[in-house]
Image (tube, rainbow, N blue to C red):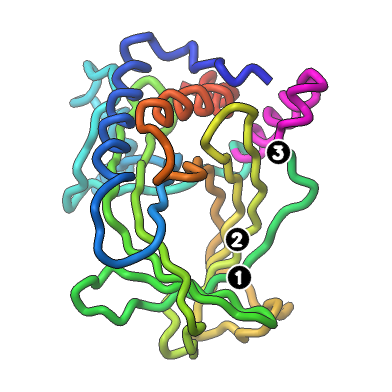
Amino acid sequence: VNSSSTAADMDADSLLKLQKIIHEQLRANIHRDRRSLGKIECELRVGRIINIEQDERLARMPMNAGIRQPVILPLRNNIKWVPGVDATTLRVIDDGIHELYAKASPAEAESFVFPHETIERVLYITRGRNLDYPDDRVRTILTPSSMSELKRPLKHVNIMMPLLPFDLRLSFAEEMDLKQPEHITPQTVILVRRRKRVYYHFPGECWRVDLSQVDKFDPATTTFSVPLGPNDRPSSVGHEIEFELVNAQDEDPYTAAESLISTLGTVLRPLLTQV
């Protein structure tokens, strides 16, 4: 596995600009002073920044035709972040990673965290109780030993990628396991999400790659059984590609930014022909 590979289809200036954006955001957010929660979570997601009125990706609109380098875009009323990819794209990425593993040297293959099975979890999402933080969400897993986790969003950085067939979102959040599992009912749950996720971790890199199928259910018609029953049908099915900084608070921002560029180039290379 050549973890030093980069997205050759992007010019050097664009790669440096993306690495600079990521480095600056990591430096400002992963070691920030905070008063409340536990660990910092940092994730990069693949998706699209679209114009809602025209239902078109912003990077493909005529007004942005002259832009080639990555650009941070604030969201406005008519500009929206849409996470995820289609099922075919997710399969292409998964096949590409399997191919890398098959070609790896014995030493590389030994340190390649290659999954043997997909991890499936059902998350019940409720709102946090701190009125000062209206975006707080509590994620509860119903198992014989149920657990709840509070997640507090800190910042989203939406990056338009004109030379690629997708855009990126760098997200920072605080997370804390709750001592007592949240008491959930159909009245308090705002979303039921079943995530089938497979993890990959390349040798020498500090970012983990998560490929997921995400099924969303209407709480009003969900049985709340473990596992969900055969009559629980998802209201929507999505597919997501995420890169998570494994130990965000312990990483050097420059090293982490450099590692992310390397991992992005390795994982997303099969998609670059779609531009």
- Answer few, some or many: residues within 10 Å of disc 2's Cα (few below 14, many 20 plus, some between 14 and 19): many
x and y percent of residue 248 in the render? 43, 44
Q: Nearer the viewer, residue 221 or 257?
A: 257
Q: Is residue 204 above or below residue 171?
A: above
Alpha carbon distance from label 3 to label 2: 20 Å
The kind of residue on which mark 2 rests is Arg
Q: Decide whether residue 2 is among the magenta residues.
A: no
Which residue is rendered at x = 55% and y = 16% of the image?
4
Boundaries of the magenta span:
90-112
Q: Which residue bears the numbered disc 3?
A: 113
Single out the mark in the foreground, 3 or 2. 3
Q: Is residue 169 above or below residue 92?
A: below
Which residue is rendered at x = 21% and y = 79% of the image?
131
Contact check, label 3 and label 2, Cβ < 8 Å: no
Q: Which residue bears the numbered disc 2?
A: 195
Alpha carbon distance from label 1 to label 3: 24 Å
Compare marks 3 and 2 and give the one earlier in the sequence: 3
Which residue is rendered at x = 48% and y = 26% of the image?
259
Compare marks 1 and 3 and give the one earlier in the sequence: 3
Which secondary structure lies at badge 3? Answer: loop
Contact check, label 1 and label 2, Cβ < 8 Å: yes
Q: Decide whether residue 105 is among the magenta residues.
A: yes
The kind of residue on which mark 3 rests is Val
Main SS of residues in magenta: helix
Which secondary structure lies at badge 1? Answer: strand
Q: Which residue bears the numbered disc 1?
A: 122
Which disc number belongs to residue 107?
none
Q: Quadrant of residue 73?
A: top left
Q: Is residue 50 above or below residue 271?
A: below
